[in-house]
Amino acid sequence: MKKAMKLQSHDLLVGADRAPARAMLKAVGFTDDDLSKPLVGVANTWIEVMPCNFHLRRLSERVKAGIRAAGGTPIEYNTIAVSDGISMGTEGMKASLISREVIADSIELVARGHLFDAVVALSGCDKTIPGTVMALARLNLPSLMLYGGSIMPGQFQGHDVTIQDVFEAVGKHASGKMTDAELKDLEDHACPGPGACGGQFTANTMAIAFEFLGMSPMGRNGVPAMDGRKDDVAFECGKMVMELVKQNLRPRQIITRKSLENAIAAVATTGGSTNAVLHLLAIARESGIKLSIDDFDKINRKVPLLADLKPGGRFAAADLYAAGGTTLVAKRLLEAGLLHGNQPTVTGRTIGEEAANAHETPGQQVLRPLASPIKPTGGLVILKGNLAPEGCVVKVAGHSMTKFQGRAKVYEREEDAFVAVKAGQIKPGDVVVIRYEGPSGGPGMREMLGVTAAIVGAGLGDSVALLTDGRFSGATHGLMAGHVAPEAVKGGPIAAVKSGDTITFDIPKRRLDVALSQREIAARLKKVKPPVPRYTSGVMGKYARHVSSASEGAITS
């Protein structure tokens, strides 16, 4: 018989010495009965600034009701969130990746400070999702993460659209292919209500990854934000965490090398975001598990691309849910022998047992059969070479280019590259190089969706490549290499590139190279004078001083 979990909240609340603590908790409405039960933190990333997390107050009430129904005492607390979609292309975007660390730190601190016995984390926008799971891995308390769900597609000129279409429309508008009125009409209808960005962008990528990791209940993250069933899911998650307390099942028992491989396979087969590399490396580090950037490529070579999802495909996240959801994805991978089916999950069942419950909607076209994949290998590849000795990440889902050679056009900031695209200065055959946007150099490793979408919108998506020590939105598609490491500010070879240099992408050989000798690169690097740091104090300065390489997950712990 499993030994019952010792409640650490008793150290906070039990005995005459703890009367002051009980008195303060009674001041906000808790009773003696409440304080005799397990204390369950409900870590909410609700914020009013974005649709992704806007509805999480509603879901938190249902989670708390589920906890109470199962014999626990919920205590809700909040943390921050930064919207990538809103801050994209501005100085504010530098805060996005940094927010992941602040989210993880704040969830951890509140739970440790008040000796919670368990935690349910609610997430929405991109960085809130890995930030919550990083905290849960650190705390190692019975816990789970519930994703708030995807936004529904918007409607524009008779077809479904997402925020990706708005970003690309900026490029179309700048090149005269879209009128002011059309852009305004698209802007008004692309985002019809609460929920995270609707394609297989970073939010939905990580939501799926963490179901396959086992830290979110299989099939529940995929329920769209405004689907009435989401409230039932939230209630169920409240009850579920209490079962985790009873079973004393903790994240370090769920997050293993094999479950991380399951998560990577899920990203590969769904054509997920390049940001998954950063976030899963970070989760591995927080969990004390050895995982390298090369492991992503090894798994990608074995896993077929099955999901026809935006940005490179036809369908939105809500369509995948309607087709059979992540459980169906798990079934496909299990049947292919590409899933470690014996790994535990927060439901109390293994991921293989969850996959056995899959139901496929007849006639669905979102997820291909194993016999007819979109591509025989997955959506992400890792390139190395003399431009990226520590590696970089390329998303190959949604385009067919395997080789590209062109002349470099070098920019020291994202804004300068964006101006160049809008002004028509980028031509077919160019390789846009954006540097000093890495984890430390930015700081904050901005996403380049504004630039990449403008390139696609200008009709250059198949004739221009881009590389950066920054990163990309999950909505980015085309031949784009991100996370180039070492970054420029750390003396990476990207700092040596000059406009006019010849750069070669070779996907089959997994190479990214500039036509320079190692001697020439070294000589140029000696002459490089990095820009003066934009931030030397505050959260930005602190992050720049402590953050690791992108090849290690850009973490600060």
Image (cartoon, rainbow, N blue to C red):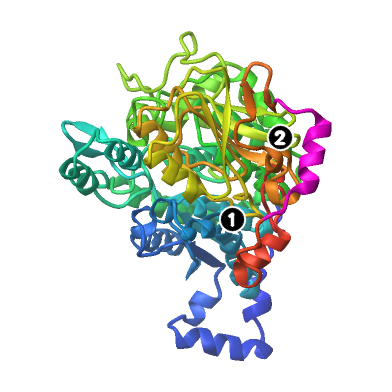
Name the residue tied to disc 1. Answer: 444
Name which residue type carries label 2: Ala
Q: In this view, does 531 lie above or below 302?
A: below
Q: Position of residue 101 (x, y in %)?
A: 61, 59
The residue at 51%/81% (across/down) is 32
Q: Which residue is drawn at 42% across and 39% down?
A: 421
Q: Nearer the viewer, mark 1 or mark 2?
A: 2
Magenta residues, start to end: 515-530
Q: What element carries label 1?
A: loop
Which residue extends farthest right? 519
Residue in the picture at 39% in, 57% down? 53
Left or right placement of residue 265 versus residue 318 in this view: right
* Location of residue 295 in the rendering, given as x and y in whole percent from the top left corner: 71, 30
Question: Where, by quadrant of the figure, is residue 456 drawn?
Answer: top left
Helix, strand or loop for the magenta stretch, by majority: helix
User: How far from the left and from the top, in percent, is residue 57?
Assistant: 36, 63
Q: Is residue 282 left or right of residue 367?
A: right
Please rate how many residues cluster around mark 2, counting C-alpha atoms within 10 Å: few if below 14, some from 14 to 19, many from 20.
many
Please tell me whether mark 2 sits on a helix, a strand or a loop: loop
Compute the Cα span from label 1 to label 2: 19 Å
Does the image show residue 490?
A: yes
Circle 1: is it few (<14), some (14-19), or many (20+) Cα within 10 Å? Answer: many
Q: Which quadrant of the view contains residue 494?
A: top right
- Indicate yes or no whether the magenta region holds residue 520: yes
Q: In which quarter of the image is residue 214?
A: top right
> Compared to 233, does 33 lie above or below?
below
Q: Which mark is residue 388?
A: 2
Residue at 35% from the left image edge and 33% from the top image edge: 457
Left or right of 281 in this view: 206: left
